[in-house]
Image: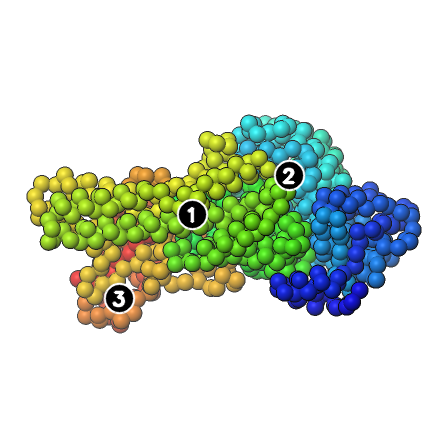
Amino acid sequence: MLAKVSYMSYQRISSTLLGALLIQAICLGVDLSKAVIVTPAKISPVEEKAITVLIEEVEKRTQIRLPRAERRDGPAIVIARAAPGRPAEGYTIATDAASVTVTGNDSRGVLYGVGGLLRQMRMKRGGIEIPDGFEVTTAPKYALRGHQLGYRPKTNSYDGWTVGMWEQYIRDLAIFGANAIELIPPRSDDAPDSPHFPLPQMPMMIEMARIIDEYGMDVWVWYPALDQDYSDPKKVEFALNEWGEVFKKLKRVDAVFVPGGDPGHTQPKYLMALLEKQTANLRKYHPKAQMWVSPQGFSREWLDEFNAILKTEPAWLTGLVHGPQVRGSIEEFRRAVPKRYPIRTYPDITHSTHAQYVVPDWDLAYALTYYREPINPRPLDQAAILRDTLPLTIGFLTYSEGCNDDVNKTVWSYLGWDPSRDVAEGLREFGRYFIGADMDDAFAQGLLALEQNWRGALASNGGVSTTLAQFQAMERAATPELKRNWRFQQALYRAYYDAYVRRRLLHEMAAEQEAYDALRSAGGSGSERALELAQTRLALSAETVAPDLRIRVYELAEALFQSVRMQLSVAKYGAISRDRGATLDGVEAPLNDSPWLARQIAAIRKLAGEDARLRQIERLVNWTDPGPGGFYDDLGNPAMQPHLVRGPAYAADPGFLRGPFTGFARMPWRQQAAGWRTSWLTDSESFYDTPVQLRYSGLDRSAQYRVRVIYGGEPSPSRVLKVTANNGRVLQPERRIEALTDPVEFDVPREETAGGELTLSWSKPRGMGGNGRGCQIAEVWLIRR
């Protein structure tokens, strides 16, 4: 060995291509290709599983099967146990000239130490190396670090997984520090069967619980209370029998989590009475099992009732869960919950819109094509969410609907262990372990770039093309084995898909602009000629662009179905619906206003009289013009909402509980096909009692102003909005929003603008439950009369 550098120096050097070549040249690192594995004479079943993981995962990547030995004689990987009293689940890894020692503080610590070792090894065919001088002593910050894995039809991939695939995935999660898995019982808010199931639900649940137990991880069960009326003793008896049949078939259950809603909707006094009985039912089969509950979907009235029950501190209850549709922040939740009860979170890491943690200022083109459940690596967003929400908790079990959120699970796992870790370094470990040591940094930077593809306006995001070029370079260098790797395929699919959507968007925007230019010429050329030319230009939107990118997207969709059972299309791969991850079915969705504009052009051509046609053409081309001295906001377009009052920075409020966010109509392609303008498909909206506000300055103090608003959004019986000015003067009393695309107008009293400023506030009735949405506003004109 020609040189020896510290591990941190190695990390800094290896982040550059020149540094990587230098390291290779001077042979830095401990060569473990001829090592033996030395273990204590007596080891626990979990420690035995850890040794199996080490042997098998090294062999997969190197074709080297490391032998076991009773003592060290030459290069070795030594597995040891620390003296009692050290932090639970922690471990130490230390290297010397020819060996590495992994010392676990307990059985789990051995498993996580092996995981830490595997993440640091540089493995390739015929070679195993670890940085010389590498040493770490570590233990987890949060006691609970887990993920929900639901074997049910609604998921975008899980329902096709075999027992072997489940074991591999649970192993992968453990290697990055997860210590709990949450299962879903056969009856949930889902269909009873899937054409993809290799086993019925109950036998697979039994197998999954067995696997989790073999890895020494905790088995949680997410068990919704689905029946309508638990005040009925017969319904309670039915539930006790149904749940009991599940509990007694499972080898291990450490905890049960019952959501108060989404799904289920039971008044707190009946829900808590049921859960007291279910806790006794559970402990007949698993005496130490815990019972947890969340107030998801509760109105303010129900939440007050729930909190009153908590104040009596029922002894059967173990802890509380903060998740989607829980009113208020984690800080408010902690203040309301008695100190005796720990809190865990249930963060939605799987959805991009209509979710607990939406992608901030997502572009409409992505919402129309990907919609709710795409492949969604969001490492920096997930880090912000974790660091904002976990400090008052014991940890988390994430909400997942498939392997689309695989990167996010890994980020939560390693930051749940150490929240101060550098996100990029964790991604390098992800790349090194799952993709290969020669691409660890490139793949990590690629994942970060995919997140940046979703930042801001897609049309102006030239980084999308750069991201594709980076992944194409990796694709050219990939081995046949790597090209079959589903994690590599997922990243390629996203890179190609993003680039294809952007190319289509630019093309369709140009066609739309040409159509509007033609309409603007109507005063000189006449309406008939202008309308005909606009229609011809608009038809160019449907032309095929970037066919090479399109073909590759379809090829990768097929590859992902074959490799990991991802169902990216309803027709091709049996996805349950387009909004459940079937992103291939949206890749050709129109991205401009052509559906709406074509209808408008057709309607205008039917009008009798040139003057009538010209008036309607002028309305079209001046749609956003509020007139002299007026103001316009397209509230779903971040580039056209100058008067929107924003909330705190994302890191301080990633759930948008204190400010508005960009929202979309549910399944927006349907409204688009029905003739909605794109400005109606997006909106600014807020959760629960938080208002959406617009603030104006520089107004004419002597003028009369009038507000015109188009609400867009989604129909709902509970969508009731009130509009107030400044300090609360009511401009629009509470009204149900039913005609979503019809303009609503009302005057602003002169005295409200006499100071030259105006704040408009839209709000829902306070205290409503459910998902907290409904305060949605698409377009607003403030017109000077």
Q: Secondary structure at mark 2?
A: strand
Asked whether the viewer can see residue 668, the reply is no
- Please report whichever mark, 1 or 3, sits nearer to the chain's N-terminal start: 1
Type of the residue with mark 2: Leu
- Residue marked by disc 3: 752
Give the spatial CA distance, label 1 vs label 2: 37 Å
Mark seen at residue 92: none
- The answer to which quarter of the image holds residue 87 is bottom right
- Please report whichever mark, 1 or 2, sits nearer to the chain's N-terminal start: 2
Residue at 67% of width from left, 47% of height from top? 173
Q: Residues within 10 Å of mark 2 (few under 14, many from 20)?
A: many
For residue 228, above or below residue 617: above
In this rendering, the label closer to the viewer, 3 or 2: 2
- Residue marked by disc 2: 183
Give the spatial CA distance, label 3 vs label 2: 56 Å
Count the marks.
3
Residue at 30% of width from left, 59% of height from top? 633
Residue at 27% of width from left, 50% of height from top? 512
